[in-house]
Amino acid sequence: MNKQTRIEILTRLRDNNPQPTTELTYNSPFELLIAVILSAQATDKGVNKATERLFPIANTPEAILALGVEGLKEYIKTIGLYNAKAENIIKTCRDLIEKHQSQVPEDRAALEALAGVGRKTANVVLNTAFGHPTIAVDTHIFRVSNRTGFAPGKDVVKVEEKLNKVVPNEFKVDVHHWLILLGRYTCIARKPRCGSCIIEDLCEYKDKTDL
Ligand code: SF4
C-alpha cells in the first residue's frame, strides 16, 4: 500500500470519528490499568460490567489490596482467567504502593515490570491515560493491518513497528482506536463486512464481501 492511500484511510477514519477512545470505562489512570489487565481475552463489555461494581468499592491500589485475592475474585469472577488476573492485580497494587507512590508510572519499562502488564497493556495505558503516541497492537489491529495491506507483518511486534513507521505523527495517538473499532465492528474476524466499510475502495484485501 502506498503512502497516499494510507493517508486517505487515516483521514477518512479521523473524519468519521474525530475523538476516538477506548470502550473500557475508567476515570483515572489506575482504573484504566486495572480494566486493561482484566480485558485480556475478555470483551470490554464484560470488563465494564465487573468494574461497574468494583470501582465504587475499590479504585485505588490500597483499596484493592485490602480486598485481597479472594475478595477481588468476587468482583471479577465473570471474566475469563479471573484467578490469574486477581493474583496479578494484587501484586501490581502492592508494587504501585511500594515503588511508585501509589501512582501509575508514565514509563514503559516501569509499566511492563508490573504483574499482568505486557507490551500491549503498557501501550494502551501510555496512549490512553497519558496521551503518548504509542500503538497497541491487539488481535483486531493485527488482522486489520494485514488484511487491508496497511501495515502487514507476521507477528504483533512487526505490525507495531510497521505502524510506527508508516503512520504520520498527527495520526499516531488515535490510530489504534480507529483500527480496533474497525476490526471489532466491520472488519470482523469471521467475515468482514466490506459492503458497509468506509475504506472499502482503499483497502487491498483480495476477498472482499458484499455484506
Ligand atoms: S474492506 Fe473489508 S477487508 Fe477491507 S477493511 Fe473493510 S471490512 Fe476489512
Image (cartoon, rainbow, N blue to C red):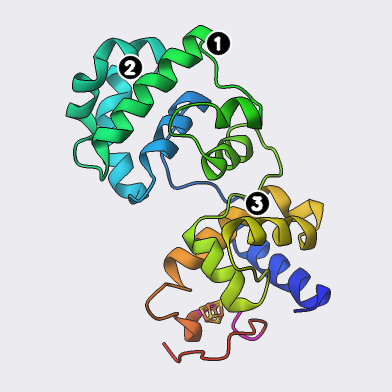
Q: Position of residue 109 (x, y in %)?
A: 64, 29
Query: Compared to 197, does 17 lie above or below?
Result: above
On the rendered image, what quadrant is the C terminus found in?
Answer: bottom left
Q: Nearer the viewer, residue 183 or 120?
A: 120
Q: Is residue 183 visible?
A: yes
**Residue marked by disc 1:** 99
Indicate the quadrant of ligand 1 in the picture: bottom right
Q: Are marks 3 and 2 in contact (CB under 8 Å)?
A: no
Q: Nearer the viewer, residue 131 or 151?
A: 151
Q: Earlier in the sequence, mark 3 or mark 2?
A: 2
For mark 2, give the secondary structure: helix
In magenta segment, residue 149 = no
Q: Residue at x 55, y 70 (%)?
A: 144
Q: Earlier in the sequence, mark 2 or mark 1?
A: 2
Q: Position of residue 207 (x, y in %)?
A: 51, 91
Q: Earlier in the sequence, mark 3 or mark 1?
A: 1
Q: Position of residue 182 (x, y in %)?
A: 52, 66
Q: Residue at x 59, y 83 (%)?
A: 200
**Which circle marks residue 64 in the picture?**
2
The secondary structure that most of the magenta stretch takes on is loop
**Residue marked by disc 3:** 174
For mark 1, give the secondary structure: helix
Q: Residue at x 64, y 86 (%)?
A: 201
What residue range appears in magenta?
197-201
